[in-house]
Image: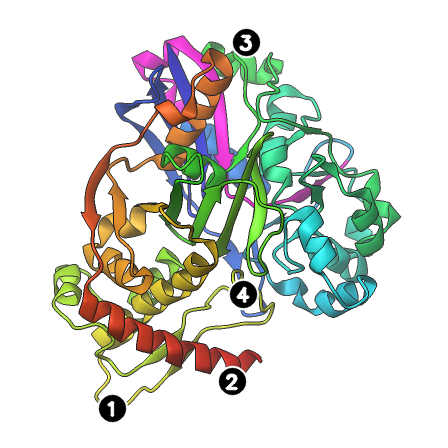
Amino acid sequence: MTLLVIDLGSSSARALLFNDDAGLIDGEICSRKHDFFTDNAGRATADAAELRRLVESCIDEILTHPAAGAVRAVGMASFAGNWLGLDADGQPCTPVLTYADTLSHSEIPALLQKLGGDADAYHQAVGCMLHPAYLPAQYARLLRAQPEIEARIDRVSDIGGYFYRQWFGIDAPVSFSMASWSGLLDTARRDWHWAYARLLVGERLLSKLPRLADYDQTPTGLASEYAARWVALRDVPFFLALGDGAAANVGSGAVDSSRIALTMGTTSALRVVKDIERVPRGLWRYLVCAGMPLIGGAASEGGNVYQWAMEALRGDDRGLDGQLSGRAADCHGLTVLPLLAGERSPGWQPDASGTIHGIRRSTSQLDILQAHMEAVAIRLSLIFDLLKAPGATVVAGGGALQASAAWAQMIADAFDSPLQLLADTEVTARGVALMMLKSLNGVDLADQPPRFSRIIAPDAGGVALLRAARERQAELYRRLYS
């Protein structure tokens, strides 16, 4: 039997086939690239209909594989921290608002005032910081700036719920996992925090929030158009979408407090599955599913910083990783805040932006690239220090790390901790497959370890140099955002 996984990330839509042991069926990845729409005002949105077209195209293609004739179930992960408004016909009436959208940063002072000037109780209840990455600020801005569009919204949905509305013709619930990224889920009770929704956004939102369910509440029975198009999927269960970060933890084998998962793709995050009494300031508490709280911090920077630097510098990356590996840490004299898409963890400054300090005539393109890569590693080390626990190991994956041994070394040095690099390249999709098997077969997630390629040990000299660079970065941050 076969499992079909839809993996909708920040830069691509993909469909993959796994076997009943959560092993990727070789060569069966269908992919389509996409980009968020961004501008200098802080907007970062996506077009829901275009994302659906790309995902459906991936499914069309994957279903031509012989193994797709025996699909047992379909699962999904999507970039977490997304929502859109659907009208009474289930059609989008807003763009997809994303975690990277900071356009609503001006709403934060008024929301903070509604909380009496202290957002700590809110943070502990919903697990999220008060920040434009989340639904309250984004919806408040919509109400203020575009009331005519808000009036058309019949239902707030995550992107997976929109897909299911089209594919099944029903209002599917949102999973606890996706809802926990909204900033309005009471994570302890696993229900909407109606009091904070009313206080921060107002009565209009309350009737528009979707139903909640665990990821394994599975719609079946495709609508006639899709039943004819995807015959093999006509009567198979579709699991509700998981947040991509939650799925990546499961796929990395980080399913308890003994392992901290680092994922670096377009963006980056550090997460650990454990329950704690209080969420440290700067971190968040999301849910993988009922009974699996996820503590961590996410940065809006990762592979996107490397991509920006290469495009801005018009660089050629052939042989580049070897050049970077041969250079001493912090040899460029630059201090960088790599906050090109704003800041989430750990400072959550809603109006933060990228900064380069110390450029001279002798500064080279390679200096600028190295400084940005090290700056990302240093920023992640701030989250690691809030998260680390005695005896916990760091398992690391994601396309950015697998493509650059030099970057993995920078991170090990910034953390002053070994990194266990994952051999599996599809940890998010693997996590979805494992969560499906947990529900279908009762699989124990702890009995499904990932494969590792190697261990990156910190270098004492690099540790000392990046510690000094971290102090300079912290001072620059204080001067700009104190």
Determine the residue located farthest toward the right in the rendered image: 203
Mark 4 / mark 1, whichever is N-terminal: 4
Which residue is label 4 attached to?
Answer: 39
Residue 252 location, quadrant: top left
Q: Residues within 10 Å of mark 1 (few under 14, many from 20)?
A: few
Helix, strand or loop status at disc 3 = loop
Magenta stretch encompasses residue 353: no
**Residue 77 showing in the rendered view:** yes
**Residue 235: mark:** 3
Mark 4 / mark 3, whichever is N-terminal: 4
Viewer-closest of 346 and 15:
346
> In the displayed structure, does residue 318 sit left or right of residue 270?
left
Residue 384 location, quadrant: bottom left
Residue 468 location, quadrant: bottom left
Type of amino acid under label 3: Asp
Callout in the foreground (4, 2): 2
At horizontal 27% and vertical 35% (from top left) the residue drawn is: 424
- Image location of residue 141, percent across then percent down: 74, 60
Type of amino acid under label 1: Arg
Which residue is label 2 attached to?
Answer: 479
3 and 1 marks in contact (CB < 8 Å): no
Locate the N terminus by quadrant.
top left
Magenta stretch encompasses residue 70: yes
Mark 4 / mark 2, whichever is N-terminal: 4
Numbered range of the magenta stretch = 59-87
- Image location of residue 399, percent across then percent down: 30, 47
Viewer-closest of 49 and 82:
82
Q: How many marks?
A: 4
The Cα atoms of the two marked residues, 4 and 1, are separated by 30 Å
Viewer-closest of 447 and 277:
277
The Cα atoms of the two marked residues, 2 and 3, are separated by 59 Å
